[in-house]
Amino acid sequence: MEKQCKQSRTLLNQNVFKIWTVLLMVVLMVTACAPAASTATSAPAASAATSAPAEDTATKVVSEPTVLPTEVVVEKTDKATVKKGGTLTWAELGDFNSWNAWAMSGTNDIMHNMIYSRLLWKDASGEIHPDLATSWEIAEDGLSMTLKLRDDVKWHDGKAFTANDYVEMFGYTKDKVLSTSIGVQKINGLLKSIQDVIAVDDHTLKLTFAQPVPFIYDILDYWYAILIPDKEDGNLTKTMAVGTGPFKMTEWKTKEYVRLEKFADYFNKDVPYLDEIIIRRLDQSETLVPNLMSGAVDGIGKVPSSYVETIKADQNYDVMINEGSGNIINVIVNTKLAPLDKKEVRQALSYALDRQLIADEVYYGISEPITSPFYSPATIAYRKDLVTAHEFNLEKAKKLLDDAGVGNITLTFVTGTGFPEWKIYAQIWQADLAKIGITLKIDEFENAKFYEIAQKSADLGGYNLAGWSTGRTKRDPAIFFQTQQQYGAGEKAGMVNPYGWYNAEYEDCVTKGRTELDQAKRAEYYQRANEILVDELPMIQVVTNPYVAGLSKNVKGLYADLLGFYGFEQVWLDK
């Protein structure tokens, strides 16, 4: 194992340092070709603001209106020191493949809080903040929620935002043409608990429920306000996306960059501080840090863990590690294809996965090994004994294969270039699987092609396994199960696993947990569902996956919400 540790670390380091000097020179040469910043006026002076109170427990029925301040400052900033105006340049891997905020894709999530707004949102500590809504109340019987909306909100196209816009958005989830949109599918699973959406008047919205919804605040935290003018374009890639957020999309060059300008009619007149943000899209992970450290960009997202120490070592840069809603690295298992239709074979794969080695050597100690998606005590689905239930054990893996009558097989694994660690951990897995008679063939595609296979193909493109990353494991389990298709429990639960796996007891637990108001009973249902997941393995968990951003120390005011998405409206440049 010691030899393998050294080999994996050496492999990664060789990839990094061989090309470092060349990449830095290339970055310096092409910086002049980057999009030029446009001229814009500075924002007006900021006014004082306060934070919203913490949310009550999920099961408490609120009968009195909850009134929160309409302006929020997440991190208190000395207004005298804020320097307004300027352009922030940010870089991430892979091109945007959807501007629909409901799709919640890791490749696209940088834009969520720039372009879009929500009725309310939760910060990293779980505290509720108002956004498009100013106050709300839940009926005593728990069967409805009434929200008062701001009267000064405009869409980026100049139209006034009203309660009827959310009625129209709710209609998207019932539209047959939009039913193939990944974003609409995801939000539809989430909104299953909402029976109807009613515009009482232009600035009063009422949500009705067939039964009390103990996680309604978590639902609203995901429900961004979007417009889909062309139902044939559910990903919103044919025209500029329109939202109500602090920045307006003004230019997009595929595979190059997107330009977002300060929205002059944003309802909070104190922000944003920046005039403009340019998000550059890069093809190779090795180019991220050279772009940052050459000064070509001010910040980079989704930084490979192998670069964290490099960034930290330079006093001109900071690293921001953000656990968000509990992102994890996992493997999609296509149970439609034999022999992965056998539970024992899936278990063998899990025991043959050296998660600790991967956490230490591929993710440089930033991640933790996990067997269960619910690794954090923050979720009621958590069970400590399940977190690392499958310790690395090749002998046990081989016995499971023998007992299943399976040996000397070939499996295929697909990954994307935007996730370099996935290929490396697959190579470690490949070496260990070979010791028990399994040949693992690894294919890597650029991100767009990879997503076609892993997200849009009904049969996983004919592959047995695919690298993947899943979020929301720390949120209310109802949110997790209604948004994560790969963990789909069935029709009754609102989400069907697309790769053939089904367990009736699992579906029953997930379905009952969604509506049960007794938290102790909800915990029982979800912990049993967790146990079934770890035993059946429709997804194989690998390690935790905190988001890592690299920033110039000139970048101030960046924060992350409970979804792990960054907020840029309070960002300013100290230069």
Image (cartoon, rainbow, N blue to C red):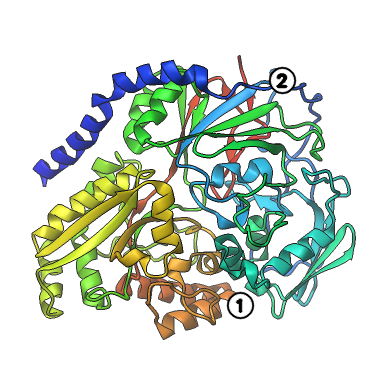
Determine if residue 315 is in view. Answer: no
User: How would you rate the neighbour count of disc 2 (Cα within 10 Å): few for under 14, some for 14-19, many for 20 or more?
Assistant: few
Question: In which image quadrant can residue 540 be found?
Answer: bottom left
Q: Amino acid at mark 1?
A: Thr
Residue furthest to the bottom in view is 504
Q: Which mark is residue 39?
A: 2
Q: Is residue 265 left or right of residue 231?
A: right
Residue 123 at what x, y percent from top left? Answer: 62, 47
Residue 417 at what x, y percent from top left? Answer: 35, 44
Residue furthest to the right in view is 201
Residue 71 at what x, y percent from top left? Answer: 78, 40
Which tag, 1 or 2, sits closer to the chain's start? 2
Mark 2: secondary structure: loop
Q: Which mark is residue 544?
A: none
Q: Which mark is residue 515?
A: 1
- Foreground of the two, 235 or 127: 235
